[in-house]
Amino acid sequence: MPKCIYCLEDKNALLFNTEHVIPESFGRFQQNLTLINKVCTKCNQKFGDDIDLELGRNTFEGISRYKHGIKKANKFKNRGKKSNLTMKIAEGPLKNLVVELIPDQTRLKLVILPQIGLRKGDGTYDFFEFKEIPEFQHLSEKYPNSERLILIPPGVNINEATKSLNKKGFKFQYQGEFITSTNDILCEIDGQIDKKIRRAFAKIAFNFFAYFNDEEILFHPTFNEIRDFILNGNVGIPIKIDNKSILADEKSAKSIRAGHIVAISKIHGKCIFAQLSLFNTFRYTILLAKNVNFNKNIQAGFGRFFDVQNMKIHEISSTELIFPSVNLIIPKVKIWIPR
Ligand SMILES: [Zn+2]
């Protein structure tokens, strides 16, 4: 009877289904990496309803799916207040204005949420949602009298904005239109990478490890912590997040490839790490096991590149490489390991 690599239960093969190393919502690749009879239906379902869903909906990588055409724009659902991502305009007079994404036939489009801007002494604006507009009489010196100008961003209903301003004691008179360029606007996304999201990344890493290693290694108790973290989030697992490259040649050449990268490394013969990036954006370095003290042939020191342009998977190895002079950078990470 097969045993599930997450809950460690032995079950009839009928109670297992196919687990994709990288969730299918992040691309259906040719000769995709799947785990057969390794993840039970119950665990698979639990992941699908929880951490995988979170990974798609609440991350920068999730939004990147629309940009790369992995998901169609008309499938995009705005999560509003439920989302833990905030998107703001990052340049120009509308800097710091909160925006949201909505589907627009073939692409995602920015919409401006109802807000007004109060001009500060330095000429920039602070933006407020209607119900958060401060009382006029309590305005701080941050917004000096002489330059107390109000900006109603394009697309915001002027009548409603005026009403909200009047309620707070502002005597507001519409002065004219504000002209913005029609070019693309640089935005910044603020978000929290919470435990669920870290667990979702850890699952991809451990799935990948499980694809290449045999059962004797996979069921070793040294991997129980990572299993428990992914399944229940009970324990803490060191995960480092940065925006460094995983592929060595991208360090200098900056030829950023479009796709997912997963790689496994063994350090000092004792720790097993995975490096993972979806859409080659942020790098997650995940400790899969520490103090590996058994003498088995662990498959590590290689990776795969999931090309989202042609949906093919390429091999990355430290000696034999798909891209000339590409080497895996062995992560140098400082981790705190509890005794
Ligand atoms: Zn299971």
Image (tube, rainbow, N blue to C red):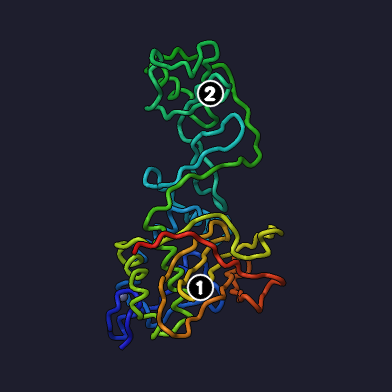
Res. 52 visible in picture:
no
**Viewer-nearest of discs 1 and 2:** 1
Query: At which x and y percent is residue 265?
Result: 52, 72
Give the secondary structure at mark 1.
loop
Q: Could you say which is closer to the camera, residue 117 or residue 281?
A: 281
Identify the residue at horizontal 66%, vertical 39% (top origin): 183
Q: Could you say which is closer to the camera, residue 233 or residue 237?
A: 237
Residue carrying label 1: 268
Q: Which amino acid does label 1 sit on?
A: His
Identify the residue at horizontal 61%, vertical 40% (top origin): 185
Give the secondary structure at mark 2.
strand
* Image position of 24 with respect to 163: above or below: below
Q: What residue type is labelled 2?
A: Leu
Indicate left or right for 124 with 251 as reference: left
Residue carrying label 2: 151
Quarter holding the C terminus?
Answer: bottom left
Query: At which x and y percent is residue 273?
Result: 48, 69
Res. 10 visible in picture:
yes
